[in-house]
Image (cartoon, rainbow, N blue to C red):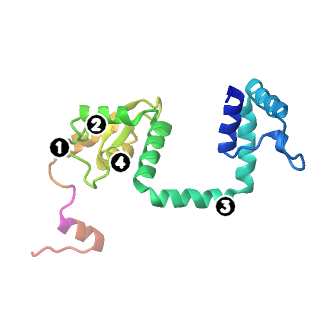
Amino acid sequence: MNEFDREVAEIRKRGVTPKCFGKGKGNATAEQWAANLEYHKRFGAQDKRKEYRRGWYAKNRDLTKGRTKQWQSENPQRHAAFVQKAQLFRNYGILPSQYGAMLSGQDGVCAICGETCSRGNRLCVDHCHDSMAVRGLLCGKCNSGLGMFRDNPDLLRKAAEYLAAGGTPAFDIVTFYQLATGTSHDNN
């Protein structure tokens, strides 16, 4: 079997029908196969395949979505791993191996509080919203806390000073009650 015949057999195995097998054309001759293969090798069959796939998907959207949902339900771990990998790369530009290296570099704990994620989830990837640079891995609470302070170090310092000052509360409960109700509880 020569190289051409091997290519033709490979294409037929995959169920691909070359252009020369279009409607009403019957069987293609070897010359037609060769011309078709040579055309696709030379003139970027990749673009044509993309165009064909888009058209096929548009016509078979429901079938494709059904098959996808079925695969996802039959392979939940593989699907979760795929989604996680895609999200890490799409959102932060890092690979799962880089995430793993960061996690082991932090001994598997949050970079701020030093605890593992309380809900059993993975640690969040903390990043600068301006430069999109990844800073480290945080538990959900610390990540939310930074977000609430708008990633502003000055606000965080003020909050830390406020907590460190402790002191007496601005109102005790009796004063608060008197102000709220407009009454006085003097025992004199």
State the residue in front, 21 or 91: 21
Mark 2–mark 1 distance (CA, rounded to whole Å): 34 Å
Three-letter code, disc 1: Ala
Quadrant position of the N terminus in the picture:
top right
State the residue in front, 123 or 78: 78
Disc 1 designates what residue? 165
Where residue 166 appears, x then y in whole percent? 16, 48
> Neighbour class for label 2 at 10 Å: few (<14), some, many (≥20)?
some
Mark 1 element type = helix
State the residue in front, 151 or 28: 28
Disc 2 designates what residue? 103
| Residue 129 included in the magenta stretch of the image | no
Q: Look at the image and give the residue range highlighted in magenta.
A: 170-175
State the residue in front, 111 or 146: 111
> Neighbour class for label 4 at 10 Å: few (<14), some, many (≥20)?
some
Three-letter code, disc 4: Ser
| Mark 4 touches mark 1? (CB < 8 Å) | no
Q: Nearer the viewer, mark 4 or mark 2?
A: 2
Tell me the residue at 38%/37% (across/down). 96
- Examine the image and state in which quarter residue 181 appears: bottom left
Where residue 168 appears, x then y in whole percent? 15, 53
Sequence-first disc among 4 and 2: 2
Sequence-first disc among 4 and 3: 3
Disc 3 designates what residue? 62
Q: Residue furthest right?
A: 24
Q: Nearer the viewer, mark 4 or mark 1?
A: 4
Tell me the residue at 20%/73% (across/down). 184
Mark 2 element type = helix
Residue 18 numbered mark, or none? none
Mark 3–mark 1 distance (CA, rounded to whole Å): 62 Å
Residue 144 numbered mark, or none? 4
Where residue 72 appears, x then y in whole percent? 49, 57
